[in-house]
Image: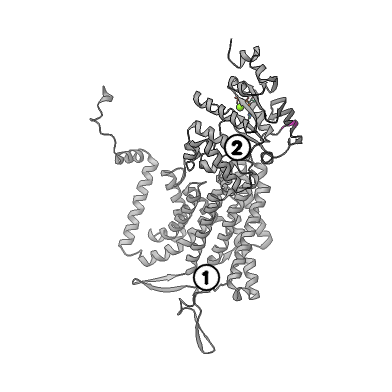
Amino acid sequence: MTLLQVEDIHTYYGRIHALKGVSLAVEQGEIVTLIGGNGAGKTTTLNTICGITPAAKGRILLNGEDITHLPAHQIVARGVVQSPEGRKIFTRLTVRENLEMGAFTQKNPAQIAQDMEFIFSRLPRLKERHNQLGGTLSGGEQQMLAIGRALMARPRILLLDEPSMGLAPVLVEEIFELIRRINEQGTTILLVEQNARMALEIAHHGYVLQSGLVALSDKASVLIHDEAVRKVYLGEA
Amino acid sequence: MVSDTPTLVSSPSRWTGFLDRNLRNPLRLVGIILMAYLAYIAIANIASGQFTLERFVRLFIFGLAQGSIYALIALGYTLVYGILSMINFAHSEVFMAGAYIGFFAINAMDQSGFLDDQTFLALLITVLVGMSASVTIAVLLERIAYRPLRGAPRLVPLITAIGASITLQQLFLRLFGSGTRVYPDVNFFVLPGIFNNLECIEVNGAQVCRGLDLIGGRYEVEFLGLSLQIRPIYFLVFFLAVIFMAALWFFVKRTKTGKAMRAVAEDKKTAALMGIDVDRVIVTTFVLGAVLAGAGGVFFALYNTQVQPFMGFFPGIKAFTAAVVGGIGNIPGAMFGGMFLGMVESIAPSLLGIPNQLRDVIVFGMLILVLIFRPTGIFGEVLSEKKA
Ligand SMILES: Nc1ncnc2c1ncn2[C@@H]1O[C@H](COP(=O)(O)OP(=O)(O)OP(=O)(O)O)[C@@H](O)[C@H]1O
Ligand SMILES: [Mg+2]
């Protein structure tokens, strides 16, 4: 079943034509990765899906429902949740308050408390620091918090924008492991990554974005062996 | 080699650091000299008996009330600035509207006799009417004047705010005339059991004492050898302001919407990604500011008694000054700045032997002094850090 269907979306920043007809599909339960160079339009694609930079043309369907023109907060309420590029932790809110903001669309206090306990059990470093201001966390801790915060919204589909950016290699491993586990528990994931190899290793399906267009798309296991992909995105000769 | 001989040159002490920071900066130097000069005048006035303790207590109590009003208004400036990085210059008219529309309520109830019969209820209604007027205006302002300009260069909403301020003054002027309206005298008697020798009248030949008149009362009190003039309303205003501010603090710190407000203030895009309706939170912020300003307007009018369409200007600009002194965008800063400014304005002219008409000079002089030493205000954080 297709959970998220993006059909030929065009997005502009003023006169800059950032997305020139991007289409992609994410099946329920999959990890789909979106790779591409700097400025290819990966972040813009996620933000267009989330209603932050609405599409000028094209359609976005969630489970068949057209969400293209909904305001951002209503898209979140439907279970499309993004953990943005650069983590964007609320630096002047505590760790706990950051998680509470993640749960902003959730109405059941008992369930919110339970979800928070679950996240603390998975990410014990956050638990230790639950009363600390978000801005005082290390980069790795902030990334954990950003993912935990997104999970608090109980996403049907989780959009992750470069979760491994700027992290030490061990932490990158840890983050990818976390993403895999989240997916195994039933959350569909759309993953934007610079680290194309690791992304393709855990993904089921991949899209290669180039200058606002989908240049390639295939099973991740096929893309990882694709000549052009290996050359350009995996840094192989 | 040179760097390996730390013992020869002692590291600068705090004191030399202080001198270094302040004496090399001509502005700070001027500021220090000015403060020293003012301190000298103040001490001279106290020593010569010009400025008595009785005077001080009386001015201090008035400062409590005036400072409370400034603090209540300043919070509105600071809340909106915190969330939109914009100075809502029309906030002074939000305050005015509360006092002015409150007048119609209290005046009608005075004429019908309800104010005398049910004083507490009548006062409550007046405050609620004032608040509603302020909230209505603030919400309309946000919707009509500011929301369409979100994302425009910062100067644009600023100029719009000034225009909105003038428009509102003129609107009230055309609607209600330029005349000054006077709040009726209110006598609100409380605690006759405790204050059993106050406000006594003859009823059918017997003496009845009605207790403390919280609003209209003026009392001479002998206390520790000082003869003090006390108006309970100044304490009442301070007390009510503290309650409002505590409620605001609780709201912002503890409630879900309050936390969302702080999230929106920090990063609107990410707040939207949390599922927060950013527009709604912004409206809520305007409403909160207006509730405080509307209540402040009625409180102010209860002791100042006069209302007219331009009455918002000076309290508004002083409250704005208070918000800047405290560090704009910072809630405790606005509370502190307002109280501080009210106190200074009340006490300083007398303390320095300056004519009372010059108190505005003192207020704005103080703004400059604070900004020389702390450009971000007393509680202000470094802006670059906040906007990072
Ligand atoms: N706010 C903006 N205003 C103007 N142009 C923008 C804005 N944001 C992005 N762009 C442009 O849109 C294009 C796509 O940018 P986008 O951020 O989506 O790329 P990306 O694939 O996420 O890149 P990166 O890997 O560097 O994050 C780029 O050419 C960029 O310059
Ligand atoms: Mg990006």
Badge 1 marks a residue whose secondary structure is loop
Q: Chain of mark 1?
A: B
Quarter of image, res B113: bottom right
- Label 2 CB sits under 8 Å from any ligand 2 atom: no
Residue A67, labelled with which disc? none
Q: Position of residue A196 (x, y in %)?
A: 60, 20
Specify whether disc 1 shares its chain with disc 2: no
Magenta segment:
A55-59
Q: Quadrant of the N terminus of chain A?
A: top right
Q: How many marks?
A: 2
Q: In terms of depth relative to the viewer, which is nearer, B332 or B21? A: B332
**For mark 1, what is the residue?**
B215
Quarter containing ligand 1? top right
Q: Position of residue A40 (x, y in %)?
A: 65, 23
Please rate how many residues cluster around mark 1, counting C-alpha atoms within 10 Å: few if below 14, some from 14 to 19, many from 20.
Answer: many
Position of B217 relative to A73 (above/below)? below
Question: Residue lying farthest top?
Answer: A237
Amino acid bearing label 1: Ile
Amino acid bearing label 2: Leu
Q: In terms of depth relative to the viewer, which is nearer, B373 or A4? A: A4
Marks 1 and 2: CB-CB under 8 Å?
A: no
Q: Chain of mark 2?
A: A
Question: Residue lying farthest front?
Answer: A185
Badge 2 marks a residue whose secondary structure is helix
